Image: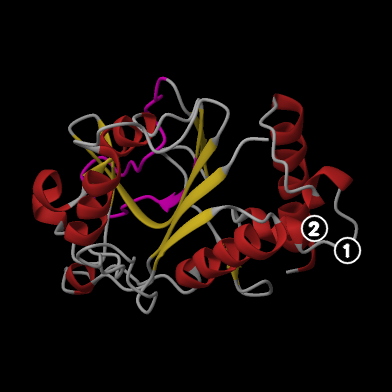
Amino acid sequence: MGRNWAIVVGINHYENLRRRSPPQASLNFAKRDASAIATWFQQEARFDRVFLFTDDSPAIAANSPIPTQPTFGHVRRFLRAQFENIQSPLLKPEDNLWFFFAGHGNRYKDKDYLMFSDSEPGDVENTAISIDYVTQRLRRSGAENVVLFLDACRDESSRTGLGIGEQRHQGVITFYSCTANQKSWEIDELQHGSFTPLAWLYRQNPPPWVKNPSFCISPRRWTSLRDATRSLLLRLRSVS
């Protein structure tokens, strides 16, 4: 049976976005989404390793502990330490590596970027991390199954009005919360983002495979997740 590792990032507060004119609103539930997903990975799915990056997550144990506050430098340092200049891959082909991000995204010069708590909208290339960079590092893990869940709403004040969701990334399975001309929702009734898989897992009668920690990636399962999430959102909209 293959191992499961996960990297989970959730960011509510963006210091440099608040300083914009007009200021861009902070998110309400991104940190909550990430914490809930990490807990589910650990306690229900029994993942082997879960690395959580939020405002108050503990440091990652290492010769020099890696802080996990979700800044550009901390996340980039982690990706480099784990997946660059290593003697042998950390995972095997039968293993799975998951990456979940809840926060802001930006599309700049035809590339998708993830924005971190200290990212500067006026200097995206040097203060945000491109999804290309993330996927390239994750593919060096040795795992053949690399899955990205990207719940990143668009940057409404960008010149194009577009957010992430345009790019396709070779060698990974990528799920975007919305296309580049859409906005991801946060749902007050759930106190979660609409894309968070946990919103579906909280349902009273999830399909049996959801409870099985031996995750296997298949189109049928992801179609089921997509359709169930869409049904949940339509139901919430009809009663709001």
Residue shown at the point (50%, 55%) measured from the top left: 49
**Residue 187 percent across, percent down from the top left:** 61, 67
Q: Residues within 10 Å of mark 1 (few under 14, many from 20)?
A: few
SS for dot 1: loop
Q: Looking at this view, is 135 or 90 the one in front?
A: 90
Q: CA distance from mark 1 to mark 2?
A: 15 Å
**Residue 114 percent across, percent down from the top left:** 30, 49
Q: Looking at this view, is 16 or 197 the one in front?
A: 197
Q: Is residue 35 above or below residue 154?
A: below
Residue shown at the point (32%, 71%) measured from the top left: 59
**Residue 170 percent across, percent down from the top left:** 40, 20
User: Over which residues does the magenta segment extend?
Assistant: 148-170
Residue shown at the point (72%, 60%) measured from the top left: 44
Residue type, numbered disc 2: Arg
- The quadrant the C terminus occupies is bottom right
The tag on residue 204 is: 1
Disc 1 or disc 2, which is closer to the eye? 1
Residue shown at the point (73%, 42%) measured from the top left: 214
